Image (tube, rainbow, N blue to C red):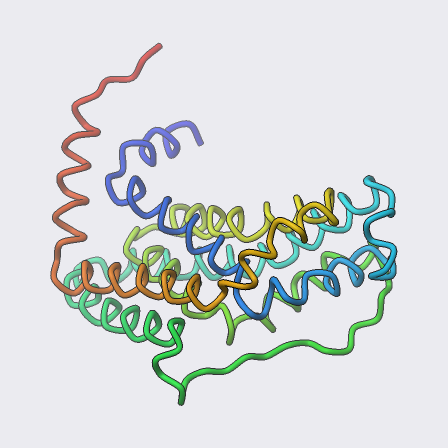
């Protein structure tokens, strides 16, 4: 395990992929299938009525939100592990795969920006019983599946980068970072519901601009993959990171 973390720390690809994955998770949180329905999600996973969320016990809110986040994280990390393993087996075709996946990421970015109406699709789970904390991980798992059509563009770029990592552990780690970006705000919202909902009012009013900015980031990553600039930057970062010795 220690050897893997040491290798990851010196990986040029992870040095630039991790921030992208984290931002992608945050953008997903502010997407139309997460942020507007946040009170409903919290009600489902805690068994507390929406009108009572701001007065519910912090322990219950924390447990429900954390278990919910763990549930959808399982879905996404399994996907990252799979894509990382596939990337390892197809390493000899790395350049060709970069071009193809880069083009896919560009399309996903345009979709997220709302510029490809034919591919715009939003799927929501409308009827879920408020059964509370005990079932929160299961709800998280199925909500993760239900979110795929909506957050697919941002998750897609993370899975693409997981494939570029070329190993299952790195792919899992990258999607775990994505889940942090998506899940930590969810937990914060659960612990300070009223304050958080007041703070995200600005984000809801500017959701279109956020989608455009997030989509622009995806398009940029796709262009870097297609042109080979991503690989060149990774190589330079690997050389830079390799110049530092371990500090004991």
Examine the rendered structure and indicate whether residue 247 appears above or below residue 41.
Answer: above
Q: Is residue 116 left or right of residue 79?
A: left
Q: Please count the marks in the image.
A: 0
**The N terminus appears in which quarter of the rendering?**
top left
Residue 125 falls in which quadrant of the image?
bottom right
Residue at 79% from the left image edge and 63% from the top image edge: 44
Q: Residue furthest bottom?
A: 118
Examine the rendered structure and indicate whether residue 89 appears above or below residue 242.
Answer: below
Residue 60 falls in which quadrant of the image?
top right
- Residue 2, image x, y percentages: 42, 27
Residue at 44% from the left image edge and 57% from the top image edge: 80
Q: In this view, does 130 lie to the left or right of 157?
A: right
**The C terminus appears in which quarter of the rendering?**
top left
Residue at 32% from the left image edge and 56% from the top image edge: 161
Residue at 56% from the left image edge and 70% from the top image edge: 32
- Residue 131, image x, y percentages: 86, 63
- Residue 177, image x, y percentages: 47, 46
Q: In this view, does 42 lie to the left or right of 82?
A: right
Residue 12 falls in which quadrant of the image?
top left
Q: In this view, does 154 lie to the left or right of 189?
A: left
Examine the rendered structure and indicate whether residue 101 appears above or below residue 77.
Answer: below
- Residue 99, image x, y percentages: 18, 68
């Amino acid at each position: 395990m220690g050897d893997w973390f040491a290798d990851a720390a010196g990986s040029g690809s992870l040095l630039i992929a991790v921030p992208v994955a984290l931002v992608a998770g945050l953008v997903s949180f502010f997407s139309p299938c997460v942020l507007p329905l946040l009170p409903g999600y919290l009600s489902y996973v805690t068994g507390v009525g929406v009108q009572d969320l701001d007065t519910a016990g912090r322990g219950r809110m924390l447990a429900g939100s954390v278990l919910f986040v763990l549930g959808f994280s399982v879905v996404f990390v399994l996907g990252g592990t799979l894509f990382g393993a596939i990337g390892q087996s197809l390493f000899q075709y790395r350049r060709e795969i970069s071009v193809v996946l880069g083009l896919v990421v560009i399309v996903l970015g345009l979709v997220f920006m709302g510029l490809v109406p034919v591919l715009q699709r939003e799927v929501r789970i409308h009827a879920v019983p408020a059964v509370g904390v005990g079932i929160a991980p299961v709800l998280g798992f199925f909500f993760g599946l239900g979110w795929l059509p909506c957050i697919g563009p941002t998750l897609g770029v993370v899975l693409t980068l997981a494939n570029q990592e070329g190993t299952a552990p790195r792919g899992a780690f990258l999607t775990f970072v994505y889940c942090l970006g998506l899940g930590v705000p969810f937990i914060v919202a659960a612990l300070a519901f009223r304050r958080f909902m007041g703070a995200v009012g600005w984000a809801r009013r500017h959701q279109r601009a956020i989608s455009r900015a997030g989509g622009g980031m995806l398009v940029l990553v796709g262009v870097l993959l297609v042109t080979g600039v991503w690989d060149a930057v990774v190589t330079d970062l690997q050389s830079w990171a390799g110049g530092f010795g371990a500090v004991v």
